[in-house]
Image: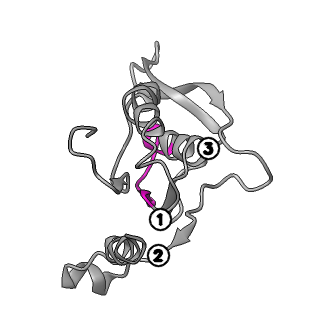
Amino acid sequence: MQHEDPDNLVIDLRLNGGGDFNQGLKYVVNPIRRLPRINRSGHLVILIGPRTVSAAMVNAVHFRKQTKAIIVGQSIGEKPNSYQEARDMILPNSRWAARHSIRFYRFVGGKENLIRPDQEIRETWGDFQAGRDPVMDWVLGTIRRIS
């Protein structure tokens, strides 16, 4: 990315089901945080939505707290302060598979256990049917005004 010298960067986490948030922090958030041309107001945009969950949700929090990113879209679809780190087990008597979380994380403070975007943009069924992406349309319009 440094070789191309971009002026803006948009990261779309709207359909990201996660992975390992430490990897996202190490390989995505931290390197971008150190790029002054990108990490400035109006030039780094993170897209979120109801299907931004797990590690993607945590990395959205990292971007909010550690960069000058603007977060755009809809509220994230899970509670940021919650039990995570899912593990599977087989119940000994029934042999049924069970999934449980082993660690409680607190990623946001305050009373509201929610991650809201800085700029909320709702998508409709009509947008989907027409092949429109109002979130990206807003971002592209905003970037053109800033540049």
Residue in view at x 32 percent, y 77 percent: 137
Residue in view at x 61 percent, y 33 percent: 83
Q: Which residue position holds label 1?
A: 72
**Image quarter for residue 143?**
bottom left
Start and end of the magenta stretch? 43-57
**Of callouts 1 and 2, the N-terminal one:** 1
Residue 136 on the magenta segment: no
Q: What x and y, as percent, mark residue 66?
A: 58, 40
The local secondary structure at tag 3 comes to helix
Q: What x and y, as percent, mark residue 29?
A: 45, 36
Q: Amino acid at mark 3?
A: Lys
Q: Amino acid at mark 2?
A: Ile
Does residue 48 sit above or below 90 in this rendering?
below
Looking at the image, which is closer to me, 20 or 11? 11
Q: CA distance from mark 3 to mark 2?
A: 21 Å
Q: Which residue position holds label 2?
A: 121
**Of callouts 3 and 2, the N-terminal one:** 3
Left or right side of 47 for 115: right
Q: Name the quarter where the N terminus is drawn.
A: top left
